[in-house]
Image (cartoon, helix red, strand yellow):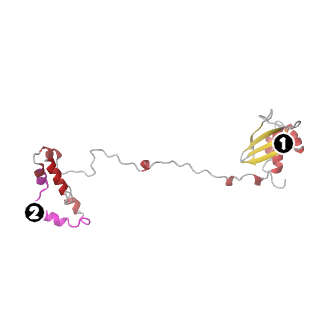
Amino acid sequence: MTAASWIKLHCVHEFFKEELKLLKRGENAYDSGHDKKCVFLNNNLKGVIKASMREQTYNVEIFFSDIGDITQAHCNCARGQVRYHHMATLLIYAYKNISVTSAGCSWSKKIPPPLVSTKTIDELYPVPQDKVDYCPIKINDDNTLKSDFEKCSDKQQYLLDKVSINNDDFVKLTLNTVGQDLNSLWLVKRRYRITAIIILVEDKTIQTVS
């Protein structure tokens, strides 16, 4: 063994401290060449150990923490659910053959991406649920009353009477609202008034209602 071992002797001793005789038996098995296979990956040591008296092998698996402590171990032999010398044999072999460069470094492990909650487009940009009777423009014009319009017999004349202005007011309104996109008075003075673009449609609607 030329490089520093990843397996720590004090961790092995701590694991077998209640049955130190198993370390001696494991060392004897190692000297006899009973270790047949050893693989170390992701803090998990797996190996195949030959039985002492017959041509039979056992699978041994040992788990380590990130700092090298042995967290658990098991073998498929009769005593494999508790500590046994097969585990000691594999640990001794690993101590002599697995260097610190053989173990995967923590900084080389892939970091899982953070959990991101997903939302649908409808959840991100919900459509406003306007009420049926909602109007974005608050109307406070007493001259326009739906009930009066519905009760009158001549609806066309009713609307004309409500929106009609004398010639002087017409000229004044025209002069004050010149330049629609630049004149702030255009919206104020012509509010609720029928524009030339839709007057034909409105006229046909009134005639149909009448």
Q: Earlier in the sequence, mark 1 or mark 2?
A: 1
Q: Where is residue 14 in the image (x, y as percent from the top left)?
A: 79, 41
Q: Position of residue 134 (x, y in %)?
A: 28, 46
Q: Where is residue 199 in the image (x, y as percent from the top left)?
A: 18, 57
Q: Quick check: 192 above or below 44?
A: below
Q: Identify residue for label 1.
A: 89
Q: Give the distance between the C-alpha atoms of the residues marked 1 and 2, in whole angstroms.
A: 114 Å
Residue 8 painted magenta: no
Viewer-side residue, 136 vs 33: 33
* Residue type, mark 1 in image: Thr
Query: Is residue 178 found left or right of 81 in the rendered image?
Result: left
Q: Where is residue 177 in the image (x, y as percent from the top left)?
A: 20, 64
Residue 54 sits in which quadrant? Answer: top right
Give the residue drawn at x 72%, y 45%.
Answer: 65
Q: Give the range drawn in magenta.
A: 158-183
Residue 57 sits in which quadrant? Answer: top right
Asked if residue 198 can be seen in this view, the reply is: yes
Residue 167's label in the rendered image is 2
Viewer-side residue, 210 vs 182: 210
Residue 207's label in the rendered image is none
Query: Is residue 40 found left or right of 184 in the rendered image?
Result: right
* Residue type, mark 2 in image: Asn
Q: Quick check: 57 above or below 137?
A: above
Q: Quick check: 23 above or below 168?
A: above
Query: Is residue 176 found left or right of 38 in the rendered image?
Result: left
Give the residue drawn at x 86%, y 42%.
Answer: 34
